[in-house]
């Protein structure tokens, strides 16, 4: 499978990788409906404050790795998706349970990524078809579109620069997805990047590929890669 790299020379800043997941289950037409928890994304936490355009840019803060964030992608109609950090790796059981609640999940730790604004790979996962399907329109997100993450009083804006695919059946492919520099395992990061990823259940099914892992994920995931272009404090 062809993969491209998101390391544009004209962008200076920090890169983030956001990965959005979904579960395919055994239904050949898409994801099955999982049992829903009683916690509602709309009531579980207040929305982030609005940014103040008059404030000067702020440097990325430390300690955001373990704080909730809110993801907005205006181009696909996504507003204030709560992103819950956890220690682990992309689309493992803890992350899947977070996604099943209708949230985004962001792993950190030895097999995870950095927090918002951190140098390296900020990973975020969320469902495409189930649990409200927050990333159902992710395939329509084009290069040059903007992604906004708000966490710990700071607004981070990223520009989408590339699209990749990840295979759950390839250790190399997973390593490329989770690398500090998306697509380049072992390379030292120098900027903050964002990989937004969700399942490719409809595409796999259409191709006759009905493989699923033990969490119901199809083989392939769609990853949108972006680079941090600005930071700004919020009130």
Image (cartoon, rainbow, N blue to C red):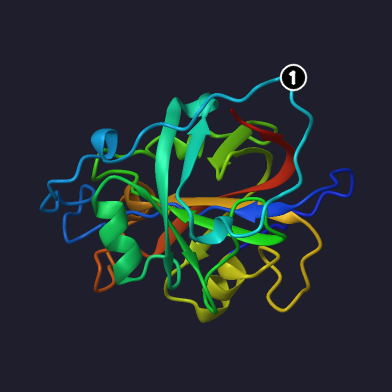
20 to 177, vertically: above or below: above
The residue sitting at 65% across, 22% down in the picture is 52
User: Please, what secondary structure does the residue beneath circle 1 have?
Assistant: loop
Spot occupied by residue 106 in the image (x, y as percentages of width and height): 46, 58
Spot occupied by residue 89 in the image (x, y as percentages of width and height): 45, 71
Q: Residue furthest top?
A: 54
The answer to whether one can see residue 1 in this image is yes
The residue sitting at 41% across, 31% down in the picture is 47
Q: Residues within 10 Å of mark 1 (few under 14, many from 20)?
A: few
Determine which quarter of the picture holds residue 168.
bottom left
170 to 98, vertically: above or below: below
Spot occupied by residue 94 in the image (x, y as percentages of width and height): 31, 68
Determine which quarter of the picture holds residue 220.
bottom left
Lateral position of residue 176 relative to residue 82, left or right: right
* Camera-side residue of 178 and 152: 152
Determine which quarter of the picture holds residue 204.
bottom left
* Camera-side residue of 3 and 118: 118
How many numbered markers are drawn? 1
Lateral position of residue 186 relative to residue 40, left or right: right
The answer to whether one can see residue 209 in this image is no
125 to 46, vertically: above or below: below
Which residue is under mark 1? Answer: 54
The quadrant the C terminus occupies is top right
The residue sitting at 50% across, 28% down in the picture is 49
Q: Residue furthest front?
A: 235
71 to 211, vertically: above or below: above
Spot occupied by residue 226 in the image (x, y as percentages of width and height): 67, 46
The residue sitting at 77% across, 66% down in the picture is 189
The quadrant the N terminus occupies is bottom right
């Amino acid at each position: 499978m062809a993969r491209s790299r998101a390391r544009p020379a004209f962008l200076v800043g920090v890169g983030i990788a956001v990965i959005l997941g979904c579960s395919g289950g055994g239904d050949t037409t898409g994801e099955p409906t999982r049992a829903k928890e009683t916690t509602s994304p709309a009531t579980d936490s207040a929305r982030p404050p609005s940014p103040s355009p008059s404030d000067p840019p702020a440097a990325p803060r430390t300690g955001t790795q373990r704080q909730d964030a809110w993801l907005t992608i205006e181009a696909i109609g996504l507003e204030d998706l709560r992103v819950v950090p956890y220690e682990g790796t992309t689309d493992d059981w803890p992350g899947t349970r977070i996604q099943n609640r209708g949230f985004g999940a962001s792993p950190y730790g030895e097999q995870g990524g950095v927090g918002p604004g951190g140098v390296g790979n900020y990973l975020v996962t969320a469902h495409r078809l189930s649990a409200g399907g927050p990333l159902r329109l992710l395939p329509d997100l084009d290069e040059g579109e903007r992604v906004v993450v708000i966490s710990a009083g700071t607004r981070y804006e990223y520009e989408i620069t590339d699209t990749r695919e990840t295979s759950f059946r390839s250790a190399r492919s997973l390593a490329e997805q989770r690398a500090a520099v998306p697509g380049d395992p072992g390379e030292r990061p120098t900027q903050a990047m964002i990989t937004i990823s969700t399942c490719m259940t409809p595409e796999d099914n259409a191709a006759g590929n009905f493989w699923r892992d033990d969490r119901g994920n199809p083989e392939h995931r769609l990853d949108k890669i972006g680079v941090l272009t600005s930071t700004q404090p919020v009130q």
